[in-house]
Image: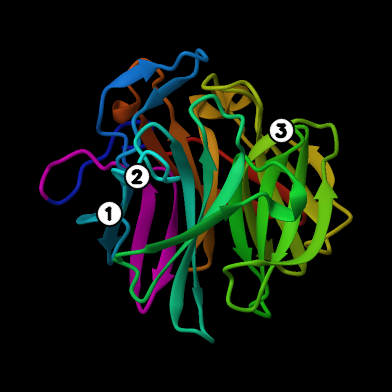
Amino acid sequence: MNRTLWHDTEGNSIQAHGGMILQHDGTYYWFGENKNGSTSVAPSGDIRVDFIGISCYSSSDLHDWKNEGLVLIASDDPSSDLYKDRVCERPKVIYNKKTNRFVMWMHIDTADYTAARAGVAVSDAPTGPFTYLCSMAPNCSDCRDLTVFQDTDDTAYLIHSSDWNKTLRISQLTDDYTGLTGVCTTAFIEQEREAPAVFFHEGLYYMITSGCTGWNPNSALYGISGNIQTGWKLIDNPCCGKDGRMTFYGQSTYVFQKDGIFYLMLDHWNPADLKTSGYSFLPIHIDGTALTITMED
């Protein structure tokens, strides 16, 4: 059921928060943060769970999910980006046809969220293991909530909140998807949007984003553009009906497609106990350039 914590085929809670779904060779892979630990408050006041790793689940029908385990695991080296006291969140994975590798981008940070970097890892299989390569400040900017988008010509982009969440940046990735070309543009300047979820439909790019209210829900907004890199315009809140102005008490994380229908993935954060945060997959209804999303079970 939407707005609840889901369970895998073994009856255990699905730990794939801030995640995404990749379809590859007829199978769906759900990647996300494993938060199956104790929720605590960092000295900075931020609510957190020690980093455990990035989970992967597989399914043929988006209903029954098999736990494939941790595909990126926390390090026991205190100097590592993946040490338990660090932040590793919002993993996004794309497949590179040229290199035949799966590339994961993620938000890497210190516990007080002042480092604000993007990390990258690679694997020969969607179920891992992923090898962590490095972290970076994309085009010399800070990086917080992020996603990746693979265009119809296979050019890929890292899209991330920057300038302390005041602006979104769109950074083109290199051909192997593990670095940046230096081509970078901005969107929604001074609009304070985060949690971007991007898709392309009939000649237009759509981006659904969240406001910046921490763990508290807010009103989603979507923008449209005829060019992934420029010309973005904020339109409206796509969520309708009861609790629509609060994004159904959830936050956007990714848009995926099945059978010609786009679905918005939401996290329903529970800051009192992050491991119990729930999920929703909601169909996106498209009429012209207008998006409508309602809460459905």
Q: Nearest the camera: 85 or 250?
A: 85
Does residue 224 appear left or right of residue 212 in this picture? right
Residue 258 at least partly seen? no
Q: Which residues are magenta?
A: 10-33
Q: Residue at x 63, y 67 (%)?
A: 179
Label 1 and label 2: CA atoms lie apart by 14 Å
Q: Which residue is mark 3?
A: 165
- Label 2 sits on what residue type? Ala
In the rendered image, residue 120, in percent from the top left (x then y), is placed at: 51, 59
Residue for badge 1: 63
Question: Disc 1 vs disc 3: which is toward the camera?
Answer: 3
Query: Residue 205's spot in the image, x, y percent?
Result: 74, 60
Placement of the N terminus among the 4 image quadrants: top left
Colour pattern of the rendering: rainbow
What quarter of the picture does the C terminus occupy?
A: top left
Q: Amino acid at mark 3?
A: Asn
The overriding secondary structure of the stretch rendered in magenta is: strand
Does residue 262 appear to the left or right of 26 in the view shown? Answer: right
